[in-house]
């Protein structure tokens, strides 16, 4: 395992040996400068080609025998092809990275760069780039105009020779500490993760904990480089921090208590909010009124501006009942309006809950389940109060005993980007195997699989390494499914904008020959029986999906299976328009 990371940039076959940070910066500047010179030369050649072509059209055969056309031996455009081909080969590319690239038709699936000359292409870190699928992804990214950085575990020539010289190489290992990965992640805009363990003994450390390390390191680097305002998550309350719990209050109704003692109204809720021995906040008590009783704990933050954020994240342990997260604003308080969103809990089990702001609806505290019409909108920049609420369910409230218990670890706000930050290549086995279905439905697995699942829930590498022993009694498919499921869960709960692609069986066939089928919840057309075929898809096609999803807003927060259709494209079967296929899928909330 590599301790720490070092960054080297190899352009045109040159290898630097100076300090890793200085070399990374210098090589990036040299690469940008070299590409700028190439673009300048290319524009000159294009102008010359255009002048030559217009001369040819005016002077007929005579014009074609002179100037640029004569030098190229076949007209201005042929000379342009030769000149640009030489420039492209210098950087390990098969074609240029600008709007004139369509003249060369270097790749039918990617005839031009996705960026204008004025745009700064995003830096994409590819993890797992030396694998069979990773090499295809890297080349497609280069052809699309991205700046590509690849993470490798060593800088041996046998490793570097697998990839074009136009990429930057960074030496790091995902199983190292989060801190050691931060140099590799510095300056990265997006990540494409194609991790695959070489053997079952390392599967959880690489595929499960490795993805978690990447996510945490990516968060840390973003905060360091851009500050909290550009980070993907912001912590609102971590209750283990000193002084956090004291700021919270519980709603009291002294008048209601007096009336209840006289038998005129139902008893008001009994509510407590305190810090337990595990440094978690506990919201506990009992609601007596069947219809209008609402228990609430709330806090009035000094300043809470969540403009630009997309929702709330809570880590909670509950009793299996439904709760509400409540938000008040400076505009809603004078008219007695509170915005609430319902979230579910799993009995006696920690879970992380994401609540988009789009799920919050206006209501009053006395009629918390009824939507209030004509209420002001939820202005995230003017939040004045946050709270947790519990009331008896609307359906059959008499069947509920009114008792409630909710432990809270933290409350955070998350930000959603306009395009995916993190593309993760998973496996369709998660959708097709019996264990995969159980994990997605409730996590209710038994036997040796339950033992393995409990083991990989550990947060430390030392505990995680023990999970390999626990899974020796599992078959190979279930071992892969457990690791991929843990990695997917880490990404879904991270606050990053992501795209999870569950690929079918990967083949080395030529891409673009069959229609692509992207589906969720068994709508890929495959068998619904457990442990059945997961379909097939070429590495070229899955690489195209990975690359295209990076810049497509419709791919945000999607999890889907990807395979090839069995028939030629018609009006009745899916097409190869990936943006249209993304639009048909349902994002995770």
Image (cartoon, rainbow, N blue to C red):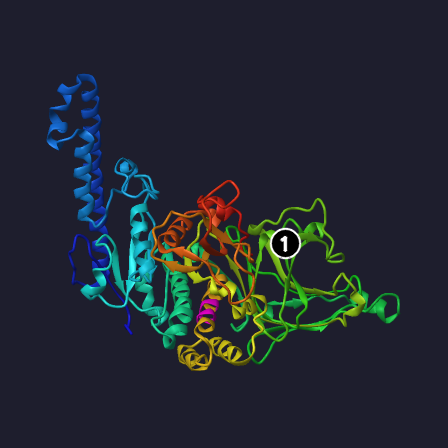
Estimate how packed mark 1 is, as few (under 14), some (14 to 19) or many (20 or more) residues with alpha carbons within 10 Å. some
Residue at (18% x, 29% y) in the render: 76
Q: Position of residue 485 (x, y in %)?
A: 48, 67
Nearest the camera: 96 or 321? 96
Q: Is residue 349 magenta?
A: no
Q: Nearer the viewer, residue 416 or 569?
A: 569
Vertical order, 489 against 199 (above or below): above
Q: Quadrant of the N terminus?
A: bottom left
Q: Is residue 462 left or right of residue 374?
A: left
Q: Magenta span: helix, strand or loop, mainly? A: helix
Give the x, y percent position of residue 207.
Answer: 40, 69
**SS of the residue under disc 1:** loop
Which residue has dot 1 on it? 360
Q: Which residues are magenta?
A: 480-485
Q: Would you say 142 lies left or right of 378 here?
A: left
Q: Could you say which is closer to the camera, residue 506 or residue 344?
A: 506
């Amino acid at each position: 395992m590599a301790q720490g990371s070092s960054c080297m940039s190899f352009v045109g076959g040159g290898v630097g040996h100076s300090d890793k940070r200085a070399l990374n910066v210098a090589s990036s500047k040299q690469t940008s400068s070299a590409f700028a010179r190439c673009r300048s030369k290319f524009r000159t050649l294009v102008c010359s080609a255009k002048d030559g072509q217009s001369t040819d059209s005016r002077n007929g055969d005579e014009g074609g025998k002179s100037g640029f056309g004569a030098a190229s031996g076949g007209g201005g455009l042929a000379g342009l092809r030769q000149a640009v081909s030489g420039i492209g080969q210098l950087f390990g590319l098969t074609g240029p990275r600008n709007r004139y690239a369509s003249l060369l038709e270097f790749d039918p699936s990617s005839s031009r760069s996705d960026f204008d000359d004025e745009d700064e292409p995003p830096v994409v870190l590819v993890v797992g780039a030396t694998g069979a699928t990773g090499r295809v992804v890297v080349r497609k990214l280069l052809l699309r105009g991205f700046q590509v950085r690849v993470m490798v575990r060593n800088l041996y020539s046998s490793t570097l020779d697998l990839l074009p010289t136009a990429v930057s190489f960074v030496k790091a290992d995902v199983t190292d500490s989060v801190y050691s990965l931060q140099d590799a992640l510095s300056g990265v805009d997006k990540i494409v993760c194609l991790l695959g363990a070489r053997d079952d003994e390392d599967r959880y450390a690489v595929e499960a904990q490795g993805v978690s390390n990447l996510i945490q390191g990516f968060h840390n680097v973003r905060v360091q480089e851009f500050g909290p305002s550009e980070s993907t998550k912001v912590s609102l309350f971590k209750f283990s921090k000193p002084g956090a719990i004291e700021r919270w209050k519980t709603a009291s109704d002294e008048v209601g208590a007096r009336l209840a003692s006289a038998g005129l109204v139902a008893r008001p809720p009994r509510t407590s909010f305190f810090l337990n021995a595990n440094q978690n906040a506990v919201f506990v008590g009992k609601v007596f009124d069947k219809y209008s009783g609402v228990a609430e704990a709330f806090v009035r933050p000094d300043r809470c501006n969540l403009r630009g954020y997309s929702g709330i994240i809570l880590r909670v342990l509950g009793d299996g009942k439904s709760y509400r997260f409540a938000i008040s604003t400076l505009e809603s308080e004078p008219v007695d309006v509170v915005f609430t969103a319902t979230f579910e809990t799993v009995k006696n089990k920690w879970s992380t809950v994401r609540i988009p702001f789009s799920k919050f609806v206006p209501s009053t505290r006395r009629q918390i389940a009824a939507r209030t019409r004509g209420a002001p909108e939820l202005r995230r920049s003017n939040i004045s109060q946050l709270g947790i609420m519990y009331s008896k369910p609307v359906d059959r409230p008499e069947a509920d005993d009114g008792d409630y218990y909710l432990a809270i670890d933290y409350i955070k706000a998350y930000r959603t980007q306009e395009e995916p930050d993190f593309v993760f290549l998973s496996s369709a086995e998660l959708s097709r195997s019996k264990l995969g279905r159980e994990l997605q439905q409730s996590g209710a697995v038994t036997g040796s699989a339950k033992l393995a699942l409990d083991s990989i829930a550990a947060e430390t590498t030392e505990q995680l390494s023990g999970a390999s022993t626990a899974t020796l009694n599992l078959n190979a498919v279930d071992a892969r499914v457990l690791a991929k499921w843990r990695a997917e869960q880490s990404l879904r709960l991270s606050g990053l904008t992501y795209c999870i692609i569950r690929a079918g069986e990967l083949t080395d066939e030529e891409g673009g020959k069959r229609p692509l089928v992207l589906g969720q919840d068994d709508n890929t057309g495959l068998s619904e029986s457990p442990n059945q075929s997961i379909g097939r898809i070429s590495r070229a096609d899955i690489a195209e999906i990975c690359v295209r999803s990076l810049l497509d807003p419709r791919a945000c927060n999607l999890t889907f299976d990807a395979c090839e259709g069995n028939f030629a494209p018609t009006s009745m079967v899916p097409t190869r328009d990936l943006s249209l296929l993304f639009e048909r899928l349902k994002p995770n909330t």
